[in-house]
């Protein structure tokens, strides 16, 4: 995971000077359990979050283009979902945590949000250091439910486009 993290954080696009388009929001939560990293290719086009009884966050899934990643954590409880429009991106993640991640709010550049969980505990707010960056992948730890959560921000070099159809 460290080499993947190093690639995303330390490898700038050839046309971009320096590393100013990449940033990390450090993990929040107790950090117990098995580590995870949810990554994909291209722009994130959807988010799913599982919460149980309006309480802990038990799992999530990201969609890159048309491809959903494997579920991280567990598909337990109620699923909340947001599908992003063309040129829409996740630009902020906030929520609450204690031992587990209690709630998550994913907010887009168009002002839409996905709310999941119960807003109790310590508050956190994550966003990129550069206004041109968006959510690229997430990481953290899982033990029964999600025990820690961090965000990794960067610039997508090409906007997401649907594949061409040939007749």
Image (spheres, rainbow, N blue to C red):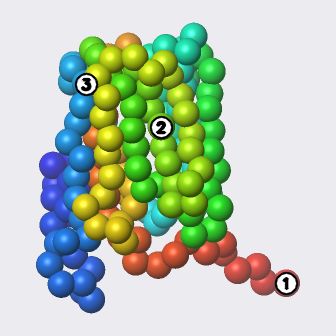
- Asked if residue 148 is positioned above or below residue 44 in the image, the reply reads above
Other residues around mark 3 within 10 Å, as few (<14) / some (14–19) / many (≥20): many
Of labels 1 and 3, earlier in sequence is 3
Of labels 3 and 2, earlier in sequence is 3
Residue under label 2: 105
Of labels 2 and 1, earlier in sequence is 2
What percent of the width, then of the height, locates residue 17? Answer: 18, 84
- Asked if residue 143 is positioned above or below residue 46 in the image, the reply reads above
Secondary element type, mark 3: strand
Q: Residue lying farthest top?
A: 53
Residue under label 1: 167
Secondary element type, mark 1: loop
Name the residue located 32 percent from the left edge and 45 percent from the top edge: 126
Give the foreground label among 2 and 1.
Answer: 2
Residue 98 sits in quarter: top left
Relative depth, front residue between 26 and 60: 26
Is residue 140 visible in the rendered image? The answer is no
Is residue 42 toward the left or the right of residue 84 in the image?
left
Is residue 97 toward the left or the right of residue 81 in the image?
left
Mark 2 to mark 1: distance in Å?
Answer: 41 Å
Name the residue located 59 percent from the left edge and 50 percent from the top edge: 112
- Asked if residue 52 is positioned above or below residue 60 in the image, the reply reads above
Residue 136 sits in quarter: bottom left
Secondary element type, mark 2: strand
Mark 3 to mark 2: distance in Å?
Answer: 15 Å
């Amino acid at each position: 995971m460290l080499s993947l993290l190093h690639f995303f954080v330390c490898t700038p696009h050839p046309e971009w000077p320096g590393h100013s388009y990449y940033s990390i929001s450090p993990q929040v939560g107790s950090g117990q359990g098995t580590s995870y990293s949810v990554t994909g290719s291209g722009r994130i086009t959807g988010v799913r979050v599982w919460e149980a009884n309006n309480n802990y966050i038990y799992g999530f899934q990201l969609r890159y283009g048309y491809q959903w990643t494997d579920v991280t954590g567990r598909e337990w409880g109620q699923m909340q979902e947001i599908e992003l429009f063309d040129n829409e991106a996740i630009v902020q993640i906030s929520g609450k945590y204690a031992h587990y991640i209690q709630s998550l709010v994913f907010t887009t550049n168009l002002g839409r949000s996905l709310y999941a969980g119960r807003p109790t505990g310590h508050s956190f707010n994550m966003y990129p250091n550069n206004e041109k960056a968006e959510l690229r992948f997430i990481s953290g730890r899982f033990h029964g439910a999600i025990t820690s959560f961090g965000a990794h921000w960067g610039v997508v070099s090409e906007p997401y486009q649907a594949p061409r159809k040939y007749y």
